[in-house]
Image (cartoon, rainbow, N blue to C red):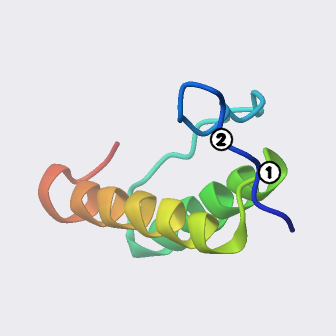
């Protein structure tokens, strides 16, 4: 997939809106679901592969912190 060009202001164009569902996080298995869903959403709105991985990793870390420190979220 081609990287989109920068806007005249030097910013990446805003991705198109995605269907933003809610993924309940209660246990380690939910971390995987959250990661996979985030990567799919990033792909659907047009992020390139490396950006998809970065987004999925960030969501995975947040979900893992939810399980570890908050218990559920």
Residue under circle 1? Answer: 46
| Closer to the eye: label 1 or 2 | 2
**Residue 37 in picture, x, y percent from top left:** 66, 58
Question: Which mark is drawn over residue 60?
Answer: none
Secondary structure found at label 1: loop
In the image, is 71 to the left or to the right of 32? left
In the image, is 32 to the left or to the right of 26? right
Residue closer to the observer: 50 or 3 = 3
**Residue 48 in picture, x, y percent from top left:** 72, 65
User: Which quadrant does the N terminus fall into?
Assistant: bottom right
Q: Residue at x 43, y 57 (%)?
A: 59
Q: Residue furthest front?
A: 8
Measure the alpha-carbon separation of dots 1 and 2: 14 Å
Secondary structure found at label 2: loop
> In the rendered image, which quarter is residue 16 located in?
top right
Q: Does 47 appear above or below 16? A: below
User: Which quadrant does the C terminus fall into?
Assistant: top left
> In the rendered image, which quarter is residue 39 located in?
bottom right
Circle nearer the N terminus (1, 2): 2
Residue under circle 2? Answer: 6
Residue closer to the observer: 36 or 45 = 45
Q: Residue at x 71, y 55 (%)?
A: 47
**Residue 61 in picture, x, y percent from top left:** 32, 66
Q: Label 2: few (<14), some or many (≥20) within 10 Å?
A: few
Q: Label 1: few (<14), some or many (≥20) within 10 Å?
A: some
Q: Residue at x 49, y 74 (%)?
A: 29
Q: Residue at x 56, y 46 (%)?
A: 23
**Residue 55 in picture, x, y percent from top left:** 51, 59
> In the rendered image, which quarter is residue 2 located in?
bottom right
In the image, is 48 to the left or to the right of 22? right
Q: Residue furthest left?
A: 69
């Amino acid at each position: 997939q081609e990287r989109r060009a920068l806007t005249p202001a030097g910013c990446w164009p805003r991705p198109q809106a995605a269907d933003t569902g809610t993924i309940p996080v209660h246990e380690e298995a939910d971390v995987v679901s959250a990661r996979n869903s985030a990567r799919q959403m990033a792909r659907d709105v047009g992020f390139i592969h490396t950006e998809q991985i970065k987004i999925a990793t960030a969501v995975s870390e947040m979900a893992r912190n939810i399980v570890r420190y908050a218990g559920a979220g």
